[in-house]
Amino acid sequence: MSAIVEQVLSLVPAGVEAEVTVVEHASAVTRFANSYIHQNVADTGTRVTLRLHAAGRTASGSTTTVDAAGLARLVERLTATAALLPPDALWAGVAPAGSLDPAARDGFASVDPATAAATPAERAAVVGAFVESAKGLLAAGYVRTSTATATFGNTAGQSLRGGYTEASLDGVARAASTDGGPADGVARATSRRLADLDGGLLGARAAAKAQATIGGVDLPPDDYEVVLEPQAVGDLLSGLSFYVFNGRAFAERRSFARPGEAQFDGALTLVDDALAADTYGVPFDAEGTPKRRTELVRDGVTQGVPHDRRTAREVGAESTGHSNGFGDTFGPMGTHLAITPAGGPAATEATGPVVDSDVAALVAGVRRGLLVTDFWYTRVLDPRSAVITGLTRNGVWLIEDGEVTAPVRNLRFTQSYPAALAPGRVLGIGAHAHALVERYSGAAHRAPALRLASWHFTGGASG
């Protein structure tokens, strides 16, 4: 247990339950635009989060002032705050003492020392490879490396420590457009190791997609069969996590999820697994509950939803290790969702808009439909059925008789994400899952490409 955790717990009044998390983080970003690096920034810090339960009332807060006076003020402030709050009837107590499951990976298995020590020059080398392989197209984006260490302790004696590193590249190549709209191609990759980011491969992919978007045509609003590339599937997973597989929404009967029912296509198996070898994160949640692999959907049948200690008590379940520290606001949700891929030979690169053989195999079965790279600016319209509206981005193409035939201008959609995955709607799953980082929450999902029977497009990007 870290000295800060011990110090905070020593200040907690007798008879008060408390849990303390100390997160030490360091992040560095190399940004580029117009094919030149224009910014290197780095940030380090320590945040202490405390939740305490006194006389039946719960208060939580945090501080970045970690000297003795700052920690004392945090405890005093929350002790006073708790006395002003209403009774907390759903308090489930702090997590009991216990170590990580021996079958789970070590608390620091997600740490790559070389990534933690990455220099601006090393990130610049990845940027340089991306720009060079873009073959003269304007390139923009960033390469980021970050590391975090979390230490947890509570008044029941639970003590855990873990950490991770993360490296990401998000880059765009822009070609000269002939139709007045953008001709952008995107390539993204994330890993716990900077060495896994191939800037040359990603730059070539972004450039090929940009060239293939030139001269986009307008299509009328309609329901189209679609092949969604992994980045678009990542947005679908984020929507499912926030609105469907969410313990708070489930407890309040706002979730689409009904365990035991065949709500999804039989081809679909969906898990949340922060301990998988191809992702990163600490192996315990904000309440000190060890994380574990959680089945959400198996062969189309809904199995359950993620829970923290509070929502688990509310519905008579057990915590699945999904407290995010903001449970009352957002609810416990999966941050490491993964659709089980079909499996098969390693994907090979291809030129043009079809990124690899996984996508090409799905496209080959489509008589008429659309190939979609990415979704963005997605917003919920109906949380209970997870109806989402948003736009396509960075490349859409018409598919005819198993071939990509023409670029298409961006489209707006309004679609229930669960309905798109309903029985009979999943027509194909890519052979391999791709690691993704959610740009706002930092969730680390893994997604294969998907071929879906229908996606409801309601208009062009302008309306």
Image: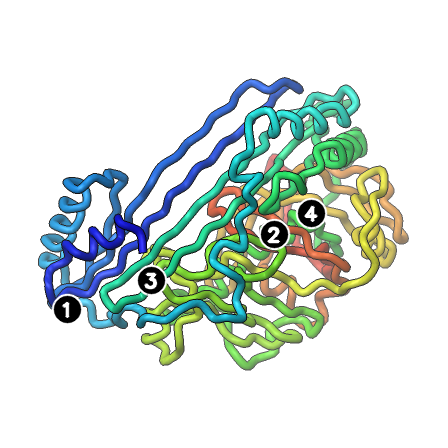
Amino acid on which the number 2 mark rests in the picture? Gly
Q: Are marks 2 and 4 in contact (CB under 8 Å)?
A: no
Residue 236 appears anywhere in the view: yes
Q: Mark 1 to mark 3: distance in Å? A: 24 Å
Q: Tag 3: Cα neighbours inside 10 Å, few (<14), some, or many (≥20)?
A: many
- Look at discs 2 and 1 and give the one toward the viewer: 1
Q: Which residue is mark 2?
A: 234
Disc on the earlier residue, 2 or 1: 1
Q: Tag 2: Cα neighbours inside 10 Å, few (<14), some, or many (≥20)?
A: many
Q: Quadrant of residue 86?
A: bottom left
Secondary element under disc 4, as helix, strand or loop, is loop
Residue 80 location (% of width, % of height):
9, 53
Residue 51 location (% of width, % of height):
24, 57
Colouring: rainbow
Q: Which residue is mark 1?
A: 56
Disc on the earlier residue, 4 or 1: 1
Q: Are marks 1 and 3 in contact (CB under 8 Å)?
A: no
Residue at (54%, 71%) from the top-left corner? 103
Amino acid on which the number 1 mark rests in the picture? Gly
Residue at (61%, 58%) from the top-left corner? 277
- Look at discs 1 and 3 and give the one toward the viewer: 3
> Which numbered marker is on residue 221?
4
Q: Quadrant of residue 418?
A: bottom right
